[in-house]
């Protein structure tokens, strides 16, 4: 019978069968018949062979080694002693922060960007790609649009970059088509042709036991089960596609910044991050936030192994950090550091900057392969079979594991409100988590982020002291009022934004207000107790002077039963009021905007004003 079904195979198919049999995969051919169409099987094998460095042989051999270690209960951190690595914890708005931004502004003009976006939003209750979700409901700006606009803003901010800054997006079979359609439908959100590159991640074979036998499909004997390999594949793809080689050797890119698919705050610390990388001469610089002891966030640590004369700086997952600390440096485990509140090991948020040329050299040596791990769920105490198929996995933040000790790895740490608020949890689950990390909390944190920046600049921005607003069991905690959106075109860094508010003491915003600023806009004096949207388009520079805007604030309302998924998962939508004040000015040119004291109507004049503003009457805000 075996001779029968093998008789009709091509030379290449015969070679594939021989390879699989040599790897202990003969079970895959059980029940095969001569006349059946086997093309799907061999096409799948060809893809599994080509997409994994070293092919199926390397994958199965690595799996056997890792599965044996898992069955023995080996501790991958045995012999390693942690300490706090080199890095800088900087307060946003401080002298040190502004100095880091000043150093990083030129580096940002030489930066390439990598977005890992291989997943759907099913975990959130959203069936499509996560980067399609709105960052907030006031403007409905999607994550992908927001990211591209940040990159374009970096290009255009003086001194203007001499080239388009490239963006590589890792997609998967689940997300590729929708991502392409989204970019095409929106003309790449203003990015130039060729500026955005999509890199498709393929899956790896799922395994049923410690012998690394590949799992057959439950429904088709000519198909095997395959699962995602993890976001660490981004390094393989950046190598195999030649993207990093092109960036480093043909485009003069000096830094590569990796960021997440649903963290809208991740670009604000970019200049400071690159500034610290430059200052400390770091090959790899993790953007981190303070973590509380026991918090379900990995910690960045320096690990040393005296027996092996080795050291490395890397992310240690939270469930490994406490037992590692107990076994080595502190019997109390994962406890607070000198400040009595936060862990001395800064929290990993999976955003980091790499120096491009050393990164390219590392990719050439490793082919982009990161250290893998396996996490099988065993069927019984014998640890030989699994309750469901497992696969090898890898994580992009494990990159430092492949570096020699001579390569410098460090961190920059800043407050979470300025750098990290992901949208990753379904609302029902988020109600039990702290922070919730859901659509509502990500939106609330973005409003707070913008409002708090204005406060740091010196603007008078009120906040709610007694907030009872909540949606689907998630409290707003006063963070959604006022609702402030500063588009990337207003500025990416604090330094950029500082220039837009030259006289912040003449800017007053009530807690009930909504404000959207989009474009090159300077606010010299503004009293806002309502809703205001200002768009400066087509090269227009808009200067607001002595503007008093009252009424018309946008409102959050319950999501209707027929609301789109992106709205339904929040439980609310934001709708404009009838009296919303919207001003759109098209350039080129500089336009001065004032309001008529009697009617409140806008007056727009195509000219600049004198820099000196000496006084502005601001009425007292009502409660």
Image (cartoon, grey):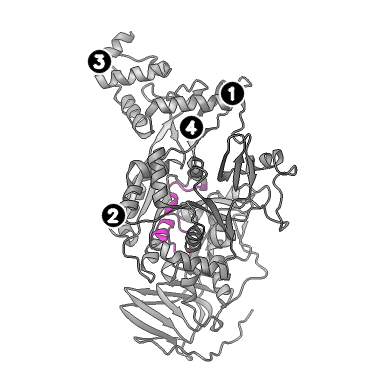
- Pinpoint residue 58: horizontal percent, then vertical percent: 41, 27
Query: Could you classify mark 2 by the number of other residues whose Cα lies within 10 Å: few (under 14), some (14-19), or many (20 or more)?
Result: few
The CA distance from mark 1 to mark 4 is 18 Å
Earlier residue among tags 1 and 2: 2
Q: Between marks 1 and 3, how big is the CA–CA gap? A: 39 Å
- Kindly identify which residue carries mark 3: 8
Which dot marks residue 379? 1
Q: Which mark is residue 194?
A: 2
Q: Which residues are magenta?
A: 124-148
Q: Nearer the viewer, mark 4 or mark 3?
A: 4
Task: Kindly tell me whether residue 254 is visible in this rendering.
Answer: yes
The earlier-in-sequence mark between 1 and 3 is 3
Question: Closer to the N terminus: mark 2 or mark 4?
Answer: 2
In the depicted structure, whether residue 16 falls above or below residue 99: above
Q: Is residue 161 placed above or below 332 in the rendered structure?
A: below
Per the image, label 4 sits on a secondary structure element best described as strand
Question: Mark 1 or mark 2: which is in front?
Answer: 2
């Amino acid at each position: 019978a075996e001779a029968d079904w093998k008789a009709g195979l091509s030379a290449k198919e015969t070679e594939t069968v021989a390879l699989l049999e040599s790897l202990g995969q003969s079970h895959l051919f059980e029940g095969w018949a001569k006349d059946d169409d086997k093309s799907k099987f061999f096409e799948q094998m060809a893809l599994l062979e080509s997409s994994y460095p070293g092919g199926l042989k390397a994958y199965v051999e690595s799996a056997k080694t890792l599965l044996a270690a898992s069955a023995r209960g080996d501790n991958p951190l045995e012999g390693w002693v942690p300490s706090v690595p080199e890095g800088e914890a900087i307060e946003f708005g401080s002298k040190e922060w502004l100095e880091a931004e000043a150093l990083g502004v030129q580096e940002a003009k030489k930066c390439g960007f990598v977005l890992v976006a291989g997943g759907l939003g099913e975990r959130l209750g959203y069936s499509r790609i996560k980067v399609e979700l709105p960052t907030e409901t006031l403007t409905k700006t999607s994550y992908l649009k927001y990211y591209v606009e940040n990159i374009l803003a970096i290009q255009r901010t003086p001194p203007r970059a001499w080239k388009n800054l490239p963006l590589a997006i890792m997609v998967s079979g689940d997300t590729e088509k929708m991502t392409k359609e989204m970019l095409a439908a929106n003309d790449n959100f203003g990015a130039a042709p060729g500026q955005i590159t999509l890199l498709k991640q393929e899956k790896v074979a799922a395994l049923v036991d410690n012998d690394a036998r590949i799992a057959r499909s439950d429904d088709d004997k000519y198909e095997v089960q395959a699962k995602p390999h993890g976001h660490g594949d981004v390094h393989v793809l950046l190598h195999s596609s030649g993207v990093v080689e092109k960036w480093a050797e043909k485009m003069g890119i000096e830094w590569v910044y990796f960021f997440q698919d649903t963290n809208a705050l991740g670009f604000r610390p970019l200049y400071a991050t690159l500034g610290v990388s430059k200052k400390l001469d770091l090959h790899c610089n993790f953007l981190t936030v303070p973590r509380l002891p026991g918090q379900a966030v990995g910690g960045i640590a320096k690990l040393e192994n005296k027996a092996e004369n080795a050291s490395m700086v890397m992310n240690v997952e939270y469930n490994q950090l406490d037992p590692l600390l107990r076994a080595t440096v502190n019997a109390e485990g994962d406890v607070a550091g000198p400040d009595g509140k936060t862990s001395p090991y800064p929290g990993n948020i999976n955003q980091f900057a790499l120096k491009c040329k050393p990164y390219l050299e590392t990719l050439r040596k490793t082919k982009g392969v990161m250290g893998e791990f396996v996490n099988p769920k065993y069927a019984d105490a014998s640890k030989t079979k699994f309750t469901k198929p497992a696969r090898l996995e890898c994580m992009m933040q494990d990159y430092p594991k492949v570096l020699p000790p001579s390569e410098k790895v460090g961190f920059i740490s800043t407050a979470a409100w300025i750098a990290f608020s992901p949208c990753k949890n379904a609302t029902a689950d988020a109600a039990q988590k702290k922070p919730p990390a859901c659509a509502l909390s990500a939106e609330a944190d973005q409003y707070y982020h913008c409002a708090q920046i204005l406060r740091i600049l010196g603007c008078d921005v009120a906040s709610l002291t007694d907030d009872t607003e909540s949606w689907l069991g998630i409290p707003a905690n006063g963070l959604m009022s006022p609702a402030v959106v500063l588009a990337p075109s207003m500025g990416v860094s604090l330094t950029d934004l500082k220039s837009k508010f030259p006289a912040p003491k003449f800017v007053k915003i009530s807690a009930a207000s909504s404000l959207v600023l989009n474009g090159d806009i300077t606010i010299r004096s503004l009293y806002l107790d309502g809703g205001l949207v200002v768009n400066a388009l087509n090269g227009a520079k808009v200067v607001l002077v002595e503007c008093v805007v009252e009424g018309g604030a946008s409102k959050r309302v319950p999501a209707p039963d027929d609301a789109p998924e992106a709205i339904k998962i929040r439980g609310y939508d934001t709708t404009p009021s009838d009296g919303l004040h919207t001003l759109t000015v098209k350039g080129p040119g500089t336009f001065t905007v004032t309001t008529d004291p009697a009617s409140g109507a806008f007056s727009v004049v195509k000219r600049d004003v004198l820099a000196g503003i000496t006084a502005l009457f601001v009425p007292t805000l009502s409660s």
